[in-house]
Image: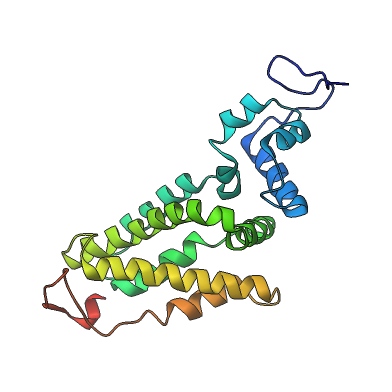
């Protein structure tokens, strides 16, 4: 017998979620229990007491439910660099900015662990993750370019973006395999490896940047 639904596809009698945060929590719980690929939007909507169309009012895709409000957090990341003191060397500013971006309270840390386990462990999420990583690196590269008198597409700003992302992902991978470790300590240790004494500015230009500038 077909299941009765309301005009929006919602299942009558189920208490509907009333916020994006509630729906995101349900998504993460179902992905963790069933697997990302095995969980359909229809199943999520039914569990949330909403219709399929309502799900897509909250999230553009199932992938976006994993990443949450990433765009909003990227805006805050960029503002952090905008407010960063000019006297702070570029590499040190990047280290502090990345740590600030990844600092969460206790309950949020649990959610982040589940979220990153999904992102790093689901092959089907990797292509979408590439777009998110690119946007994240661009924030770092724009900051470095502004400080070094270059463009985000020049070698050094681009490289610093990749180095910062690589260090952050390595810290997350270590954190996921050893739950007794502290994410911030791991990020700090990994990012301190990105400590260059001097760098040239621009794609093929060779003018050196003083060590104090980076």
Q: Residue at x 37, y 68 (%)?
A: 162
Please provide percent x and percent y for residue 152. 24, 59
Query: Against 114, is 94 above or below?
Result: below
Please tell me in which quadrant of the rendered image residue 13 appears: top right
Residue furthest right in the image: 1
Please provide percent x and percent y for residue 163. 38, 72
Please provide percent x and percent y for residue 75. 40, 48
Left or right of 36, for residue 58: left
Left or right of 131, for residue 55: right
Q: Residue at x 17, y 63 (%)?
A: 150
- Mark yes or no: residue 196 visible: yes
Left or right of 83, for residue 28: right
Q: How is the image coloured?
A: rainbow
Query: Against 214, is 120 above or below?
Result: above
**Nearer the observer, 90 or 167:** 167
Query: Against 120, is 1 above or below?
Result: above
Q: Residue at x 44, y 71 (%)?
A: 166
The quadrant the N terminus occupies is top right
């Amino acid at each position: 017998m077909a299941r009765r639904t309301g005009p929006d596809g919602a299942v009558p009698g189920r208490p509907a979620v009333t916020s994006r945060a509630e729906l995101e929590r349900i998504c993460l719980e179902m992905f963790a229990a069933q697997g990302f690929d095995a969980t359909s939007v229809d199943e999520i909507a039914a569990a949330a007491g909403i219709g399929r169309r309502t799900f897509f009012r909250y999230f553009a895709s199932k992938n976006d439910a994993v990443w949450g409000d990433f765009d909003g957090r990227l805006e805050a990341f960029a503002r952090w660099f905008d407010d960063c003191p000019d006297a702070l060397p570029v590499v040190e500013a990047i280290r502090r900015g990345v740590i600030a971006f990844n600092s969460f309270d206790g309950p949020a840390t649990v959610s982040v662990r589940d979220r990153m386990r999904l992102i790093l462990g689901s092959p089907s999420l990797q292509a979408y993750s590439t777009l998110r990583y690119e946007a994240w690196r661009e924030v770092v590269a724009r900051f470095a370019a502004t400080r070094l008198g270059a463009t985000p597409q020049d070698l050094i700003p681009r490289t610093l973006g990749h180095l910062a992302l690589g260090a952050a992902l390595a810290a997350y991978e270590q954190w996921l395999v050893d739950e007794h470790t502290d994410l911030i300590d791991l990020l700090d240790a990994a990012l301190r490896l990105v400590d260059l004494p001097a760098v040239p500015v621009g794609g093929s230009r060779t003018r050196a940047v003083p060590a104090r500038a980076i």
